[in-house]
Amino acid sequence: MNSGPKIPDLRTFLEDYEERNPADVVRITRPIKSRYETTAIAAQLEQMRRTPVLIFENVVNDDGRPFKYPLLSFLCASRERMAYAIGADPKHLASFCAERKERRIKPQVVSREAAPVKEVVKKGDEVDLLEFPVPVFHSKEPGPYITAGFITCYQRERGTDNSSIQRGWISGRNEIRFWLAPGTHNYNILREYEENGQDMPMAIWIGHHPAVIAGMNFGSEYGRSHYETAGGFMGQPLSLVPSETLGESFLVPSHAEIVIEGVHRPGHRKPEGPFGEFPRTLGAQRFNPVMEVTAVTHRRNPYWYGLVCGHVHWLSALLREAEAFERVGKSVAGLKNVYAPMSGCGQLALYLQIHKRSEGEGKAALLPALGIRTVKHVFVFDEDVNIFDETEVLWAMATRVQADKDVMIVTNCLGTPLDPSSLGTGHLTKMGIDCTRPVPSSKFPEILSIPHAVIESTPVSNYISKEKLAQVPVDPFSASISLRSEDPKAGNLICIGCGCAFPVNSEFTRLAESYVHCPACGKEFSIFGKSL
């Protein structure tokens, strides 16, 4: 193997990240079963709101026989870790990814000798996919599932690569039954081969630097290389190497952990599923395509990366956020941010944050976002609402929305068949809710506040010791809205004495005997007959 500068891959990332964040990488050495038990650990950590990188170093099968290789999980389960991997702010990933996916860098091809994924090569009868520690994640799944593997194939006529994460059941030593969602690029490529009666060469590769995983996951328009998009996210060319059994022109990532090569023959289908899907529901069994495996190449002691589908991960969320940022930004200049929360499974719901300059901009933001296929519900908020805090999100919905004016319903839309409410059809009703205040915002009641100087000068720690505060029980039913700094210009009336603005009811303009009292200087005066 040629020595030289380190190429970013899964191992360089883990080495760097564990050195800088040792508490956020957990290595589990105790024997643990690949069936259900790794999911049980991930789910419990998720309930605790802890999402460390998990490395299971002693995975065993149902009979207690240990697998030779470690299992990696939760790699993309932390938004902050994903931001770290691609050099971004976790609260501004939408704009970052929308820009970065356009930075396309052509890949470079290296020799087999320079490709770590060629350290072990197995072909034909040597292939045994069951040697890898592939989990059975949920009840009623038929067997071990590939959940973080990129299915890579090439357009039949153009020869352009296309890759996407799609599920695959390892149904035998050299067989994978996989599902390609209708309308996806890989699905269209498969149909092209089948319509022409040709075998489709394909590969599934597993494990790489999170920046590569994120970049590959961004769906370029049909006919553009995903390898180039991954290079843009890395900031350097993605390193590729020719396959072993699919021809020299079929290129795969040279620094992946594992590459599985094979073919799909026209019309070859078998039952596949059920499978635990992203909406946290069990997807029905389908009659799906089959991959006949012709070769497996991998690093020595490779990591098998298993994404715990139906549990927290940010890959799909980043994709939806960037797409919405791009679409909505063309219609609303005041778009500030986009968030696809885990409460919406990272795909079904979007929160938009805008600086609203004129009436109608809220609905103008909703329309393009609702056009994203997997998105079902979109909510738009003013920029004073923290869209990453769902208490604030629900508070804004409760206090700023009138359903007859602010709720938009669009029926008979094409969505995802994995949305359980569509009952497998993929046809559903979408909803947008405008949670913004009217323009100008002075027409709307001011949010509770205190002077900024007081907020800065009165930390709790000055009055309650850390020891005592630690003893105060956490209220599981409490909800709080962040305290705002006072806005001296907010209010519909200006004091004639000190110039302070404050809100008053319109009754003062109608009652001749009434007068107002300035809360700042105490001056009292009449506004009878005047307009507010």
Image: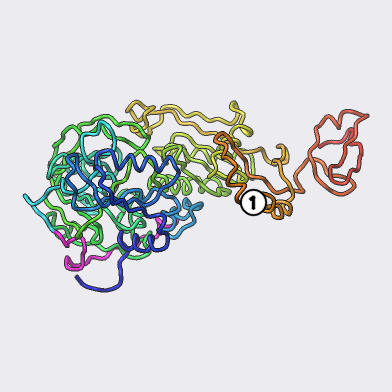
Residue at the left extreme of this rendering = 125
Is 378 covered by the magenta stretch? no
Q: Amino acid at mark 1?
A: Ser
In this view, 248 is above or below 48: below
Q: Nearer the viewer, residue 267 or 223?
A: 267
In this view, 51 is above or below 407: below
- Image coords of residue 10 (percent x, y): 31, 59
**Residue 220, can we see it?**
no
Residue at the right extreme of this rendering = 513
In this view, 461 is above or below 37: below
| Magenta region, residue range | 99-120
- Residue 44, image quadrant: top left
Figure quadrant of the C terminus: top right
Residue named by callout 1? 465
**Residue 325, can we see it?**
yes
> Which residue is rendered at x = 24% and y = 39% of the image?
35
Is 119 covered by the magenta stretch? yes
**Side of 446 relative to 215 (left or right):** right
Figure quadrant of the N terminus: bottom left
> Which residue is rendered at x = 19% and y = 60% of the image?
300
Colour pattern of the rendering = rainbow
> Which residue is rendered at x = 31% and y = 52% of the image?
55
> Which residue is rendered at x = 21% and y = 63% of the image?
116
Q: Nearer the viewer, residue 439 or 519?
A: 519
**Side of 47 relative to 457 (left or right):** left
